[in-house]
Amino acid sequence: MNVSEHPAEPTSDSPEVAQKGWDPKTMPDRRKRPTPFLSRYSFFGGKRRGKDRSRKDDSTFVDLYSIRVWAALSIFLVLNLLDAHFTLLYLIKGGEEANPIAVMLMDGGIPVFVGVKSLGVGIGAALFCILKNFPNARMGVALALLAYQVLLIYHLFLYFYADLA
């Protein structure tokens, strides 16, 4: 493409600048600062796709979250709720909780147990979402999903095969 084919950028004395009421030379350049940890575009807007955004191991904060990230974290949260559900079923059948923190939370009642457990895991999921471009965060999500799947298999084994009568 020739230089003559590029449209000229408006200058401070051009009619376009006078009509719009802003001068691009005096506006601060948003690209001089890195994308913040959280911004107004974190959940809505924030079109951050393009050639320079295609690298996956960029280890930077980007305020656009793919369906894949949301799906993984949603599965993570559902597995957490299933863990709480099967834990309570196991306790109703006469089993004992091995986690002392869970025992302390259950002393406060079922809503306290489920609420605090869900809040803690939800905060962790939000942190994983924000840090999605960092390799350690992706590894953490993968390990947490694997651990919850193994835990669900264990709960299913206890539910169908443990004789607590």
Image (cartoon, rainbow, N blue to C red):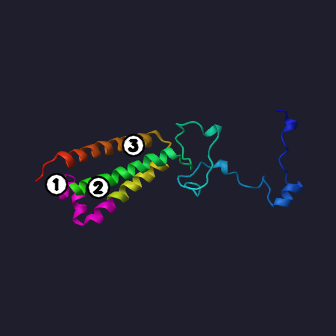
Amino acid beneath label 1: Glu
* Mark 2 secondary-structure assignment: helix
**Separation of disc 2 and disc 3 at Cα?**
21 Å
Does residue 48 appear anywhere in the picture? yes
Image location (x, y in percent) of residue 16? 86, 55
Reading the image, the residue beneath label 1 is 96
Rounded to the nearest whole Å, what is the CA distance between mark 1 and mark 2? 14 Å
Q: Of helix, strand and loop, which mostly describes the magenta segment?
A: helix
Asked which secondary structure carries label 1, the reply is loop
| Residue numbers of the magenta segment | 90-116
Q: Which quarter of the rendered picture does the N terminus lie within?
A: top right
**Mark sitting earlier along the chain (2/3):** 2
Q: Which mark is residue 85?
A: none
> Residues under labels 3 and 1: Cα distance?
28 Å
Query: Please, what is the three-letter code of the amino acid marked with disc 3?
Result: Gly
The answer to whether the residues at label 2 and label 3 have Cβ atoms under 8 Å apart is no
User: Which residue reaches farthest front?
Assistant: 160
- Picture layout, residue 74 above or below residue 1: below
Answer yes or no: is residue 131 visible: no
Closer to the N terminus: mark 1 or mark 2?
A: 2
Q: What number is the disc on residue 140? A: 3
The residue to which callout 2 is attached is 84
